[in-house]
C-alpha cells in the first residue's frame, strides 16, 4: 500500500525549537527549530519510506472556530521572536526540497491534516504531530504519530493499539473534550466535570449522545452539572471536532516525495550552517565546474598520471601562478593555474601502500614536489604547516609564497573550527572527488569575504605565524627523562601501597579503578553516607565531588581520592609521555585555528595540559 506522511508544521517546529539547543548562523539568525524539524523529517523518511509527503501550517488569520467563539485559544502566549523568525526559513527549506506545503485561511493545520488523510483511497497516512487533537483521526488507514517528548520519543497510534494506549476509541477523544473541556484551546466543556468523571461516563454510555440519552441514570451533582451544561457540551464538541472537508484543491500527485534531494538543497543547508546535514547521503550527485569569479567558470580535465616523469613534465610545461595541492591516504592531487586561463588540468597521482598496489610510494613524489618548490608560484593548501613538514621530511625547500585555506576560513567566519577540507567542500557545494579544484575555489571565495581588517589580520599575523609554529614543532619540547623515571618509580610504589591500604580498609580485594565495584564497596558494604545513585542506573556516583562529602570522616575515601590523584599523574604525565619522547624531546602539533577564543591549542601530545602545581 502507498504511504503518505503528513506533518503538523506549527506543532513540530514548536517542539523542535524547545527540544534543540539554541544556536544561530554567523549573522545571528536563530535556526535551531528548523534544524530539529528537518532532522526529524529525514528520520521519518528513512523509517517510513513514503512515496508522498506534505506539511500543513496554520495561517495567521481567524478560523471558523474563532468566529464561533471569540475566546477560542484565548490566553495562549505569543510565539517567541526567536521561533517566529524561523517559520519563513522552514518554508523556504521545504520548498527547496519540493515538499508540498498546504495551508488555507480560515482553517487550522488539524483540519487540513484531517481532510488530506481521508481524501485518498488505498493510501496509508501517517500524521506526525505534538497535538493530541489529531488522535480522533485514527482509523483503518490513518496512523497518528505523537511526539511525546521533544521530537525523538514518538508514540504511533493505530486502531490496533489505540484502546490500550488511551482507554478510549478515536471518536471518544472528541466527546472527552466536549465534557471536560481543553484549557490549551480554551474549550469550555461542562463546568465542574473533570477527566475522571468524563472517562467514567464514556465507559458507561459510549458517547455524548449516549450520555444525554441516559441522563436519568446519572445521579447527584454530576446529573445537575450535565443537565445545566448540555449546551456547552455540544458546543464544545463542535469546537473540538476536526473538519475533514476543507475545500483544498490539490491531488495526491502534488505530494510526491522526490529523493534524493536536489543539489540546491545541500547549498541551502550550507547557507544555514547545518554542518551534519550537509554531509548526509541524501543528495543527487552533481558534477560541476568551480566558479572563479562572477563571469567565468574554471573548466578542468582530470588526468591520472601513470609515471612521475609525466607529472613533472606537465607541471614544467605550465607557467603557473597559483598551485593547489591536496593529499589523502589514496591520492595526491595538484592543480596548476595561470591567471587568465579558463581551462586547466587536475593532476592525480595514486598512492600505494604495498608493492601490489598501483601508484607511487611517498618518497617517489620527490621530483614532483621539488618541481613545485622551484616554480615561482603561490602554494595553496588546507593546513600549510602539514605540507611544510612533508617537504622537510623529503629534504625539499618549501615554496616561499603560500596561502592557507583553513586559516582563511577561520578568519572569514570569525570562529575556531576543526572542520576538514572534505566538510568545507560539502558545505560549499563543491565536488569532493575534485579536491584540488574545490580547494582553489574555496581560496578565492574566502579571500573575497575578508574585510580590510580581516585581510590585515590574515596577512600580518596568522600567515606569518604558520612558519613560527612549524619551527616550534620541528624543534620540539625538551623532556627531562631522568626526572620522569624517578617520578615513575615513586608514583608506582605509592600506588601499590595505596591499593593495599584500600583493600585492607574494604576487607577484600577489588578493582579500585572500577567505579561500579568501588560504589558497592563504599555504599553497600561499608554503608558510607547515603550514596547517590546515577540517574537511571543501579550504580552509585563515585565522582571526586561525591566522595569529598565523606572524606573527612572515612579513611578509605581519603585513600581512594589520593589513589586517583597519583594514578592521574602516573598514567597521563609520566607513562603517557614516555612513548612520545624522541631523542629527549616531544614534538607536539600546535593549532592556531581550533579554538573560538583565538588561543593556541596543542595535540599529540597536549603539552598545554598541565597539572596543578603541588608537591607531587
Image: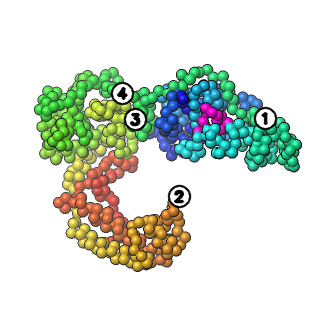
Q: Is residue 144 magenta?
A: yes
Task: Give the residue at x 51% y 39%.
Answer: 40
On the image, the x and y values in percent for residue 368 come to 15, 36
Quadrant of the drawing holding the N terminus: top right
The numbered mark, 3 or 1, whose residue comes first in the sequence reads 1
Q: Say the numbered circle drawn on residue 286.
A: 4
The numbered mark, 2 or 1, whose residue comes first in the sequence reads 1
Quadrant of the drawing holding the C terminus: bottom left
For disc 2, the neighbor class at 10 Å (few under 14, some 14 to 19, many from 20) is few
Q: CA distance from mark 3 to mark 2?
A: 34 Å
* Above or below, 44 relative to 122: below
Task: Give the residue at x 49% y 43%.
Answer: 23
* Above or below, 494 relative to 352: below
Q: Quadrant of residue 108?
A: top right
Whether residue 418 sits left or right of residue 179 in the image: it is: left
Specify start and end residues of the magenta stretch as a single range: 135-147
Q: Say the numbered circle drawn on residue 281.
A: 3
Give the camera-side residue of 528 and 363. 528
Residue 74: tell me if it is visible. Answer: no
Task: Give the residue at x 33% y 41%.
Answer: 420
Q: Nearer the viewer, mark 4 or mark 2?
A: 2
Give the camera-side residue of 596 and 515. 515
Give the camera-side residue of 274 and 305. 305
The numbered mark, 3 or 4, whose residue comes first in the sequence reads 3
Q: Is residue 51 magenta?
A: no
The numbered mark, 4 or 2, whose residue comes first in the sequence reads 4
Q: Say the numbered circle drawn on residue 536.
A: 2
Q: CA distance from mark 4 to mark 2?
A: 47 Å
Q: CA distance from mark 2 to mark 1?
A: 45 Å
Q: Nearer the viewer, mark 2 or mark 1?
A: 2
Amino acid at each position: 500500500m502507498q504511504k503518505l506522511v503528513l506533518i503538523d508544521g506549527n506543532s513540530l517546529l514548536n517542539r523542535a525549537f524547545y527540544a534543540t539547543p539554541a544556536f544561530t548562523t554567523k549573522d545571528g539568525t536563530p535556526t535551531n527549530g528548523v534544524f530539529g524539524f528537518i532532522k526529524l523529517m529525514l528520520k521519518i523518511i528513512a523509517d517510513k519510506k513514503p512515496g508522498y509527503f506534505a506539511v500543513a501550517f496554520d495561517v495567521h488569520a481567524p478560523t471558523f472556530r474563532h468566529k464561533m467563539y471569540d475566546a477560542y485559544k484565548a490566553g495562549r502566549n505569543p510565539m517567541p521572536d526567536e521561533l517566529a523568525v524561523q517559520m519563513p526559513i522552514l518554508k523556504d527549506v521545504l520548498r527547496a526540497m519540493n515538499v508540498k506545503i498546504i495551508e488555507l485561511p480560515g482553517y487550522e493545520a488539524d483540519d487540513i491534516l484531517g481532510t488530506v488523510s481521508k481524501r485518498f483511497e488505498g493510501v496509508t497516512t501517517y500524521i506526525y504531530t505534538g497535538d493530541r487533537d489529531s488522535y480522533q483521526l485514527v482509523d483503518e488507514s490513518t496512523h497518528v504519530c505523537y511526539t511525546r517528548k521533544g521530537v525523538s520519543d514518538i508514540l504511533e497510534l493505530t486502531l490496533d493499539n489505540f484502546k490500550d494506549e488511551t482507554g478510549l476509541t478515536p471518536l471518544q477523544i472528541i466527546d472527552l473534550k466536549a465534557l471536560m473541556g481543553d484549557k490549551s484551546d480554551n474549550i469550555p466543556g461542562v463546568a465542574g466535570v473533570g477527566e475522571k468523571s468524563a472517562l467514567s461516563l464514556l465507559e458507561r454510555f459510549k458517547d455524548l449522545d449516549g450520555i444525554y440519552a441516559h441522563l436519568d441514570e446519572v445521579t447527584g451533582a454530576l446529573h445537575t452539572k450535565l443537565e445545566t451544561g448540555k449546551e456547552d457540551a455540544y458546543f464544545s464538541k463542535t469546537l473540538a471536532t476536526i473538519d475533514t472537508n476543507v475545500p483544498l484543491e490539490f491531488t495526491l500527485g502534488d505530494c510526491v516525495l522526490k529523493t534524493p534531494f536536489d543539489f540546491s538543497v545541500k547549498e541551502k543547508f550550507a547557507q544555514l550552517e547545518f554542518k551534519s546535514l550537509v554531509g548526509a547521503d541524501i543528495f543527487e550527485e552533481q558534477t560541476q565546474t568551480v566558479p572563479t569569479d562572477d563571469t567565468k567558470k574554471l573548466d578542468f580535465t582530470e588526468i591520472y598520471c601513470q609515471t612521475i616523469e609525466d607529472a613533472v613534465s606537465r607541471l614544467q610545461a605550465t607557467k603557473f601562478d597559483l598551485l593547489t595541492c591536496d593529499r589523502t591516504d589514496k591520492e595526491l592531487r595538484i592543480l596548476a593555474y595561470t591567471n587568465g586561463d579558463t581551462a586547466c588540468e587536475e593532476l592525480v597521482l595514486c598512492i600505494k601502500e604495498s608493492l601490489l598496489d598501483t601508484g607511487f610510494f611517498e618518497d617517489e613524489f620527490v621530483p614532483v614536489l621539488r618541481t613545485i618548490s622551484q616554480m615561482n608560484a603561490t602554494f595553496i593548501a588546507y593546513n600549510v604547516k602539514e605540507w611544510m613538514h612533508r617537504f622537510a621530511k623529503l629534504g625539499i625547500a618549501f615554496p616561499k609564497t603560500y596561502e592557507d585555506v583553513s586559516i582563511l576560513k577561520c578568519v572569514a567566519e570569525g570562529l575556531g573550527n576543526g572542520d576538514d577540507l572534505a566538510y568545507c567542500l560539502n558545505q560549499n557545494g563543491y565536488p569532493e572527488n575534485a579536491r584540488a579544484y574545490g580547494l582553489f575555489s574555496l581560496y578565492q571565495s574566502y579571500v573575497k569575504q575578508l574585510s580590510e581588517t580581516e585581510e590585515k589580520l590574515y596577512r600580518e599575523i596568522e600567515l606569518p605565524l604558520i612558519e613560527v609554529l612549524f619551527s616550534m614543532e620541528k624543534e620540539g619540547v625538551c623532556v627531562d627523562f631522568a626526572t620522569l623515571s624517578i617520578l615513575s618509580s615513586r608514583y608506582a610504589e605509592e600506588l601499590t601501597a595505596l591499593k593495599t591500604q584500600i583493600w585492607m580498609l574494604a576487607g577484600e580485594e577489588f578493582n579500585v579503578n572500577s567505579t561500579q565495584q568501588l560504589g558497592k564497596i563504599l555504599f553497600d558494604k561499608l554503608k558510607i553516607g547515603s550514596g547517590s545513585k546515577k540517574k537511571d542506573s543501579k550504580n552509585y556516583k563515585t565522582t571526586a565531588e561525591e566522595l569529598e562529602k565523606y572524606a573527612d570522616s572515612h579513611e578509605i575515601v581519603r585513600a581512594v581520592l589520593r589513589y586517583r590523584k597519583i594514578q592521574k599523574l602516573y598514567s597521563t604525565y609520566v607513562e603517557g609521555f614516555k612513548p612520545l619522547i624522541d631523542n629527549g624531546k616531544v614534538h607536539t602539533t600546535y593549532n592556531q585555528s581550533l579554538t573560538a577564543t583565538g588561543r593556541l591549542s596543542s595535540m599529540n601530545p597536549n603539552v598545554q595540559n598541565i597539572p596543578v602545581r603541588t608537591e607531587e
